[in-house]
Amino acid sequence: MSKGLIIVESPAKANTIAKFLKNKYIVKASMGHVRDLPQRELGVDIAREFEPVYVMTDKQKKVINSLKEDVKGVDTILLASDHDREGEAIAWHLLKSMEKQMEGKQVHRIVFNEITAKAINAAIEARGEIDMNKVDAQQARRVLDRLVGYQVSPLLWRVIAKDLSAGRVQSVALRLICEREAEINDFVPKEYWRLEANFWRGELPPFKAVLEKWQDQKVEIESEAQALELKTNCENHNAILTEIKRSSRSVEPPAPFITSTLQQEASKLLGIQASRTMSIAQQLYEGIELGGESTGLITYMRTDSTRISTDANQACRDLIKDRFGEDMINSSVRIYKNKNTAQDAHEAIRPTDPFNTPENMEKFLTKDQLKLYTLIWSRFIATQMQSVRLAVTKADITLGEATFVANGSQITREGFLKCYPHVNIPLGESIHADYASSNELEHDAIEASQHFTKPPARYTEASLIKELEARGIGRPSTYAAIISTIRLRKYVHMEKKAFVPTNLGNDVNRFLVDKFDNVFNVKFTANMEEKLDEVEYGKVEWRSLVKDYHDQLQKLINAVDVKKEKSAFVQDSGIVCDVCKEGKMLIRHSKNGEFLACDRFPACKNSKNFKRDADGKIQIVEPAQLDEACPQCGAPLMEREGRFGAFIACSAYPKCKYSRPKTLGVKCPECGTGEVVQRRNKKGRNFYSCNRYPDCNWISNDKPVAITCPNCGNPFMFEKYTQAKGNHKLCPKCKSIFE
C-alpha cells in the first residue's frame, strides 16, 4: 500500500495529473457523477423530508466496481473532483458509494484551480475534508429542479402537447425572451428629427455638429415642420465657435474572464455557442499535449470571480515587459472587484502560464481551441497593461439661438488595445487642435433628417446570458444548458443570431406565467439563488428550503383545471375534416411543431401538416404522391414526415400500413448494398444511416449527397458547415473541399 489513489472526474484530467505526479499516486477517473436521481421517476421521497433516492446506471456501476478494486490496494484516497458545488457533490457520492471499502483508510478532499504540477502538489499538501454545506446546496438545487420537472411538466403534456418540459430556471429564461418579443410587437415608433451640418475655418479640416439646444434648452424635434422652422432660423445667422473644451480621459481594460463574460465574448467575437465554448474551455483546462507533456493551459472555467493570484499577476507583468516593453506595464497591480453575488471559489479564467503565448501554442491546438485560448490569454494580459489614453474635445457652435455640438476623441496612448483590441471606444469627430473659441466658422447646408425610435433588440445568446447574470437567474455554469434546452424543446428558434419564440414557446410561457407566476418569475428565481447560496454558507437548512418551495408549487398545481386550460390552447382552423366529414380540424401542438387534427379523435384519427402564408392564413401541406404503387395493396405511395424523419408510406393508410424509410440516393459507404436514409433521434436531431440496419451499422451526423468527387472519383460527398468556410462539401476519401 505504498501509493495513494487520486480520483478525478475525467480521463483527460487523470492522464495530465498522473504525468505531474510521476507514479507517486494512482490517478483514476469517476467519469463524472457516479450516481444520480433516476431518469424516469421523481426520485425524491417527499414523505421522508424530500430525501433524494440515488441510483446508478450500469455504466456507473462498472466505474464504481473498478474504483473499489483500486481502493483495496491503497491506504490514502484523495477525492479531486472540481472545486464547486457539483464537484463537491461528486466527491461525496464517491465516498457514499464506497463507504465499506474506505473504512479505516485516510480519505481527503483536494481542490485546485489549475492543472499544473505546482497547483496539484500544493493541493495534495493542503488536503482537507468534504464541505457538506456545498453538497447540501447542490442536493437542494437538484431536488428543486426535479420537483418542477416531474410535477409541472406533466401538466404541459396534458394541456398543450406531449414531451414538453418546464424548468425552474429555463422557464424564466423563456419568459424573458417571450416578454421581449411582446415588447417589440407592441412598440409604437416615435418620430424625431435631427439637424446637422459640417463646419470649418479656412483650410482646417471640417467636422460635423448636431443641433442640441435651442435658447439654451435641450431641444427635441418632433415633426418636419418644426425641423424646417429651426433650419430656416439657423441659416439666417453666422456660425461662431463659442466654446471649445479639451480634456483627457482613460479607458481601463476589462476584467479577466468569468464564465458568463467568456460565453458572451466567445459568442459575439468568435461566433461560438455557449455550450461549445464550455466544451473547448474544458479541454484547455484538463490538459493539452505539448510536445509529449500534457498540461492545463487555462484555470478552472466555471467561476464568478475576477480575482487573480499575486503570482499570476506578477507573471503577467513579466510577460508584458518581455513582449511589449516595460513602459506598457500599468504603474500598480490592477485589482478588480467582484460582484456582491460572487461565490469567489476560484480565480478568474486565465492562462496557467502567460508565456504559453498563442503563437507558441498554435501547433498544439485545433482552430477553435486556439481562438478561445487567444481570447482568454489576451484578455488576461490586458488587465496589467497601461490604460488607453484619449484626448477629448467638445465644441459648441452657436447660430443665433441655436447651439450645435460636436464631440470627438483621439487615442494618444494605445495601451492595452495592443493586446486586446476588442473594446469598442467611440471616437466621434476629429476636431483639429488649431480650432479655438470665438472662431467664425463656415458651414455647408444644414441637413434635416427624419428618424424613428427603435424597439428593444431581441436577445442574442450573449445578451441573454448578460441579462440572466444581471438579474441573478441561475448560475454561469448553467447558462449553456439553459439555452440548449429551450432550443432543443423548440420553444425558440434563431433569426439573425437572435432568439425568437415559436408559437409553442409562447403557449408554454403563457400557461406557466398564468398558472405559476409566483414561482416562474425573475424575482422569485433570483431570490432562490440567494437561498441556495445561504445553504452553502450554512445559514439555511436545505430541506426546509425545499419544503417551502414545494408547498407553494403544490398549491398552484392543485389549482389547475386541466380540461378548462386544454381548451384555451386549441385553435379552430375553420377547416372541415376531409376524412369523416363531420369533425373540425383543430390546430394542435407537438414537440415538432403545430399540426391539424380532427376534433373527433380518437374516433377519427385524421391529421395533416400545414403552413401559414404571409398573412397568417392556414394552408394544408399535402404529402407528395409518388409515381410508384404500394407493393402490398397497389395504392399510390406518398412521401410523409414523421417524428423520426421522412419516410414513404401507402396512401391507403390506415387500411394498408406499408412504409419504408426515404433514401437519399446514396449507396451505403460501408456495405455497398443498402442506401443511406435520413433519420431523427429522440432529441430531434437528424442523422444518417444505412437502410439495412441492424445488418449494417454505418451511421453519420453529416448528410451524404450523390455528387462524385472530381479529384478522386468517390461517388458521394458530405455536406458540411464551419464558421471559417460556411456551407461546403467535403470528400471523405481525399478530403478535398468544394464550395
Image (spheres, rainbow, N blue to C red):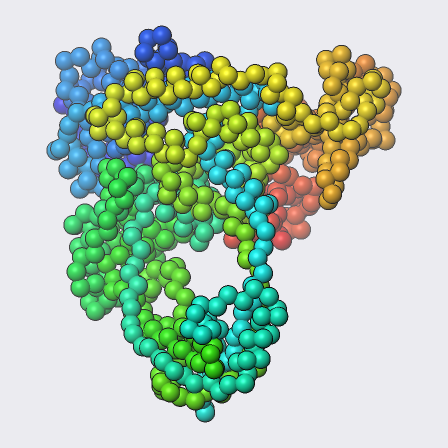
**Residue 104 rendering spot, x and y as whole percentages:** 14, 13
Residue drawn at point x = 28 percent, y = 39 percent:
341
Relative horizontal placement of residue 725, taking residue 653 as reference (left or right): left
Q: Quadrant of residue 50?
A: top left
Relative horizontal placement of residue 6, taking residue 30 as reference (left or right): left
Residue drawn at point x = 15 percent, y = 27 percent:
128
Relative horizontal placement of residue 298, taking residue 723 as reference (left or right): left
Q: Which quadrant, please, contains the N terminus?
A: top left
Residue nearest the viewer, comparing 113 with 475: 475
**Residue 179 rendering spot, x and y as whole percentages:** 52, 39
Relative horizontal placement of residue 522, taking residue 107 as reference (left or right): right
Q: Would you say residue 702 is visible in this rendering?
A: yes
Vertical placement of residue 400 versus 127, above or below: below
**Residue 152 rendering spot, x and y as whole percentages:** 49, 20
Residue nearest the viewer, comparing 678 with 400: 400
Residue drawn at point x = 39 percent, y = 78 percent:
395
Q: Would you say residue 92 is visible in this rendering?
A: no
Q: Residue furthest left?
A: 125
Residue nearest the viewer, comparing 216 with 728: 216
Residue drawn at point x = 45 percent, y = 72 percent:
213
Q: Quadrant of residue 84?
A: top left
Residue nearest the viewer, comparing 447 with 41: 447
Q: Residue furthest bottom?
A: 202
**Residue 528 rendering spot, x and y as whole percentages:** 34, 29
Vertical placement of residue 259 versus 605, above or below: below
